[in-house]
Amino acid sequence: MPHILESYRQYFPYLKTGRIYFNHSSVSPMSTFVTNKLKDFTALSSEGAIDDYMLVLKTADTTRRQLASLLNTDADRFAFGDNTSNGLNLLAQGLHLKHGDEVILNNLEFPANVYPFLNLQSDGVKITFAKSRGGIVTAEDIIDCISPATRVVSVSLVQFLTGYRINLKTLTDFCKPRGIIVCVDTIQGLGGVQMDLSETPLDFIASGVQKWMMGPMGFSFIYITEELQARLRPRYVGWLSVINAWNLLDYKLEPRKDAAAFQNGTMNVIGLMGFSGALELFDLTGSQNREQVILDNTEYFIAKLLELGHTPLMQDVQRENLAGIITFHPANGQEIFNHLQSKKITCSLREGMIRFSPHFYNTKDEIDLVIEELKGL
């Protein structure tokens, strides 16, 4: 029986080639919502109003409002950048943590959410790693590591390898009354699973858009609260960081009050246009619908792998801690990966593990085809 969003498969041209793509935790294919935006803008830039800066400003404003709607917050709290790492560096370098201050990470983080904070060790900042258990780091595991010296907790919404989705509300409920900054890398999950910042008041988000948000590579955004922004002293500023940017010869370093103060100069406009298209598709499909299909597919995939005798890492995890990533660790991971590639089935091989990551438009029929190929091995 078709699922609620299966009709949207028509917007993904690669499906005409017969491929099965279960690698959205790496990079998503571009939908026609994205490619049409890119085609229109490149045509305008090469044949029409080449310097249409008002279109850029309008698209940026619209995209901020789309993000605000997606996360249930204020549009002026978003700024655009190039990647997750640089977004996290804005926080790590802007806080000016001092000797003895502590940052809590965990030992299953993707390096983008580790190195910006490890870089602070030369300033005497203490980095503490919460330890995983069975591929899981819970909010409680992180809370157990918090000390009077803790100033920042930085986590991923979804662990990139195992697919575990952390309970952010448990974390914020503990940290907010204690003045501990909660920073989240949302690149694995946002767009696939829901987030509501009115219920889970995070301080800072950094996220590339090429994975579950289905935008172009080389474009990202940050979210920062007004309170946290007032505490930061940015290491880098540029001509667009200030209030009266177009008074070009009036050199007053008066930072903007909104999050766009962190956009120092010309942004990746091509990336912005493509991302705006991806968000238009998301507006049509709905966050709740996407999450429902993704979690249904995740549970179905786990059950089918168990029937084959494999041991998915998240087999005993509750639905609210799943998020679209299904990983197992076979003895012949490279052989399986190569075989699936030869059958036009795209997944990931990470740390010897096979990782599948279907999105909202993928179907159980596609999962069944993959399972059939695995039976032969």
Image (spheres, rainbow, N blue to C red):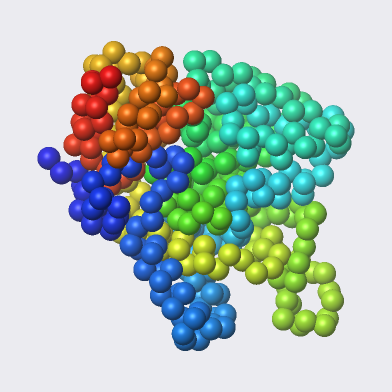
Image-quadrant location for residue 185: top right
Q: Can you name the residue that lies furthest to the left here?
A: 1
313 relative to 273, above or below: above
Front in this rendered view, residue 212 or 23: 23
Q: Residue at x 41, y 48 (%)?
A: 28
Q: Residue at x 60, y 51 (%)?
A: 83
Image-quadrant location for residue 294: top left
Image-quadrant location for residue 341: top left
228 relative to 307, above or below: below
Front in this rendered view, residue 373 or 265: 373
* Residue 333 percent coordinates (x, y): 41, 22
In the picture, measured across the screen, residue 152 lies left or right of residue 328, that is: right
In the picture, measured across the screen, residue 304 lies left or right of residue 35, that is: left
Front in this rendered view, residue 302 or 148: 302
Quarter of the rendering occupied by the C terminus: top left
109 relative to 246, above or below: above
Q: Residue at x 23, y 46 (%)?
A: 18
Q: From this viewpoint, is residue 28 visible? A: yes
* Residue 98 percent coordinates (x, y): 85, 37
371 relative to 79, above or below: above
* Residue 235 percent coordinates (x, y): 80, 54
Quarter of the rendering occupied by the N terminus: top left
Q: From this viewpoint, is residue 317 visible? A: no
